Amino acid sequence: MKTKINSIGIEKDPKDTTVVVAMSGGVDSSTVAGMMKKDGYNVIGITLKLYDDTKQTSKSKQCCAGQDIIDAKRVAAKLNIEHKILYYQSKFKVGVVDNFVESYLAGETPIPCVQCNQTVKFKDLFEESKNLKADALVTGHYVKSVTQNNETNMYRAIDQNRDQSYFLFNTTREQLNYLRFPLGSLLKDETRQIAKELDLNVANKPDSQDICFVPNGDYVSVIQKLRPEAFKKGNIKNLDGKVIGVHDGIVNFTIGQRKGIKISEKDPLYVIEINSSKNEIIVGPKEKLIKRKINLRDINILTYEKDFNKEVYVKIRSTGKLIKSNVKILDSKAEVELLEDEYGISPGQACVFYSRDKYGDRLLGGGWISN
């Protein structure tokens, strides 16, 4: 008799299926571990220690250190599952933190959560899961996955206010076929309710909001600690090239910024360009932030090039809307023509591609904005 396909799309009985659950210590990943255990899977929880912070509390809005590791251990004990801690501080420092700092010094707006998923979480954790002979790596990300004929595709979550597919555009096809995302069809309130029903101690724990190594969102203090020499004064110029002010370091500015320019003009001024080679900030009126064409580097494609001949949408920022666009793939680069105006696009941000089918908004891939 043929074995039925289980709830995560594998042709095995759950009791014969081993899954690794990435447990950050938050409610989402803890709930996923509980769901897998309740459904009869053989669950191994793995928590990554990515940086050191001894000042965390149970009300922390960050992840992957201190109290969160304790919370993950408590959940694993409650569920009676095996639990491992992997110490990846040095890998995280090189692959994520250093990249974050260098991007700001280059006048870019980095997205460290993408780098973290690409390097530490889905690369090293993927390899560790394979070494443990696990059938799948399961996470608490809010994305929907659909597995058919042993191939998995990723879609925006049902709860689009929680959707995290933007941060996962750099996932490889091999990783995606191995990954599972059980929360993609749930609302956050439903996740918390399941956590309460499982009697997990993290059921009411606040969500992670800040970048884990950036306390209170103060990224400038992180850069100042690691690269104090980067804070060099330079000129602020208008679009005619006239010097109209002085800044204390380009890392204090991002494209589209209005506050903090400290120049009195009749009309509001916005940061239009950051020239790192000249250590200059270029400012101008808001309408000069409008862009229609974007060049991308280091693109990652999860589908076939023919899919870009159909209707394609792009997302420029994680909280942004889908914008209908024309996308031209050029090996590891791409040219994107937005079919409507968009403000404040910055080098270093991700531009992520989607198409629509009967399952929802499907992730096609994406790339990094170069200019």
Image: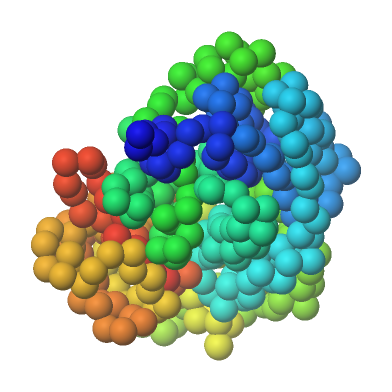
Q: Nearer the viewer, residue 302 or 83?
A: 83
Which residue does the image show at 42% across and 43% down from the upper left?
10
Q: Is residue 200 above or below residue 9?
A: above
In the visual, does 31 lie left or right of 308? Answer: right
In the visual, does 325 lie left or right of 151? Answer: left
Q: Is residue 245 above or below residue 173?
A: below
Which residue does the image show at 60% across and 27% down from the upper left?
37
Image spot of residue 318 (x, y percent) = 41, 50
Q: Quadrant of residue 206?
A: top right
Which residue does the image show at 49% across and 75% down from the upper left?
274
The single residue placed furthest to the bottom in the displayed view is: 277
Image spot of residue 180 (x, y percent) = 46, 44
Query: In the rendered image, which quarter contains the C terminus?
Result: bottom left
Q: Is residue 310 above or below residue 215?
A: below
Which residue does the image show at 25% across and 78% down from the upper left?
329
Image spot of residue 8 (x, y percent) = 43, 38
The single residue placed furthest to the right in the displayed view is: 54
Work out whether residue 361 can be spotted: yes
Q: How many marks?
A: 0
Image spot of residue 230 (x, y percent) = 71, 76
